[in-house]
Image (cartoon, rainbow, N blue to C red):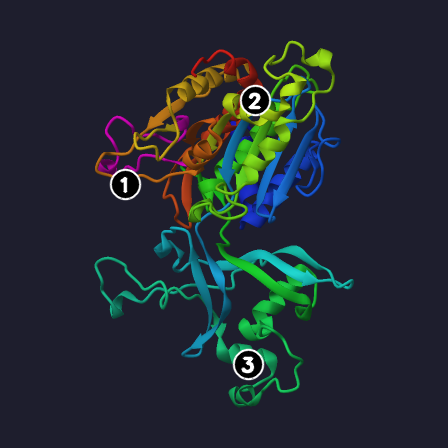
Amino acid sequence: MSVSAQAANDFLSFVNASPTPFHAVQSAKQRLMKAGFEEIKERDAWSSRCQPGGKYYLTRNGSTILAFAIGKKWRPGNPIAMIGAHTDSPCLRIKPISRKQSDGFLQVGVETYGGGLWHTWFDRDLSIAGRVMVKDQRGHFIQKLVRIDRPILRIPTLAIHLDRQENFSFNKETQLFPIAGLVSAELNRQGKTEETTKTEDNVNEPFKPLKVLTERHHPYIVELIATEAGVEPSDLVDFEMLLYDTQKSCIGGINNELIFSARLDNLGMSYCSTVGLIESLASSSALDNESSIRLISLFDHEEIGSQTAQGADSNLLPAIIRRLSVLQSSTESESDKSYDKVAESETATAYEQTLSTSFLISADMAHSVNPNYPAKYESDHRPEMNKGVVIKINANARYATNSPGIVLLQEVAQRAAQGKCGEGVPLQLFVVRNDSSCGSTIGPMLSAALGARTLDLGNPQLSMHSIRETGGVYDVEHAIRLFGSYFEHFSELEQRIFVE
């Protein structure tokens, strides 16, 4: 199997195991732990824990993860090479009270999350996954991840014979509810009838501030969730459940050159940045002459604006950089030839000095040219799949890319040829048409918050925000090698690009 095929297949394993941001963080954690990364917590002191030559990771809310490796020649105020991506994708989420029924069907109330192409969710084999809060035997409340690995929900379209509309349109509040089964079948499972159900009450139940989960949601769904969590339904206190398509991600195309998958945006870049960091550290001596910190941050909630505690617009990355910027070097002698900008008496400005020399790659999937809609693309900027990573540029700063960043990335891509493949990484350029709207990323908000140099890029894909997207097999390896080369060569290249 070729290197590209191996990378693509491992990515499929990653995305198939990650139906929610919580699961994506878990998948990233497993790879980081296997590579020797040690878990730390924001609530703890790091001064004695984090040492040059060490590899660490932390999570926030279970849906955002940040990992970093400290060069052995690190000293306060040195730069940090960063990649930022996101773990979330547009989806449907179960409402706090989801129990519905109509015309003999059990239905589930859902909310739209992000800007999804919601018509693609109709007539798909759907299930649920997420996290539950459970009360254990000690009276503690703990988080557990659950995933029901079989189709239990479906959003049915209306037969064409009943509504011959030219363009498929629907009401997201009244016509996007999945069906979960038949009322009669559920009553039969419970050994009840509609009459006995109507006469049931909870007069003798103890007071609860909120209705119990089996009243707010269909009892059998609660039971399925409890079974997956390995607890009794009465032990469930609350949950956050997302709908996902049970069809597995796979390799496609007549020459096995395509990836058909959910959540390419943005598990594609989350996976590649994680593996790129790990592969840059594969050698036991990888950090021996490293004067920088290599860091990735996979944020939640990009699809809804990032303004949450675990989003990119939170204090997470600035707070972590501030703590890292003042970490002491291992010995003075090892740091003599490293950045001679920060004397011990000047650590008060180490944070600002670190930001001024650091660099952030904002990694979010990009648009491939769609052959059925060629007029939607600018004539000279039409990225193609398997032709390389796409640099995203926008004159109105919807992306954070500028010329110094492009210079750096070209050097990084060229130096990737020094690796095991022997070839550089191809790059492409993308801008939108002047008469077209333009999406955005975490790049502009983080570059503004940090003052750090930033570049936006991503692998090209089709059908962004659909329940089923399409990407290129070879682009997975392209991004991994690019990110690995970035981490390996940043410290040297940063000193050669002079822009004040």
Q: Position of residue 141 (x, y in %)?
A: 69, 60
Q: Which residue is mark 1?
A: 437
Q: Which residue is mark 3?
A: 187
Dividing the picture into quadrants, the one containing residue 444 is: top left
1 or 3: tag closer to the N-terminus: 3
Q: Residue at 55%, 90% (x, y): give it.
A: 199
Dividing the picture into quadrants, the one containing residue 67 is: top right
Q: Vertically, is 52 above or below 194? A: above
Q: In the image, what residue type sits under mark 3? A: Leu
Mark 2, Cα crowd under 10 Å, few <14 / some 14-19 / many 20+, is: many
Q: In the image, what residue type sits under mark 2? A: Pro
Which residue appears farthest toward the right when viewing the image?
138
Q: Position of residue 158 (x, y in %)?
A: 32, 67
Between 15 and 215, the residue placed more toward the observer is: 215
Q: In the image, what residue type sits under mark 1? A: Ser
SS of the residue under disc 2: loop
Which residues are drawn in magenta?
Answer: 365-390
Q: Which residue is mark 2?
A: 79
Does the stretch in magenta take in 243?
Answer: no
Q: Position of residue 189 (x, y in %)?
A: 59, 78
Q: Residue at 30%, 63% (x, y): give it.
A: 170
Is any atom of residue 104 visible in this view?
A: yes
Q: CA distance from mark 1 to mark 3?
A: 50 Å
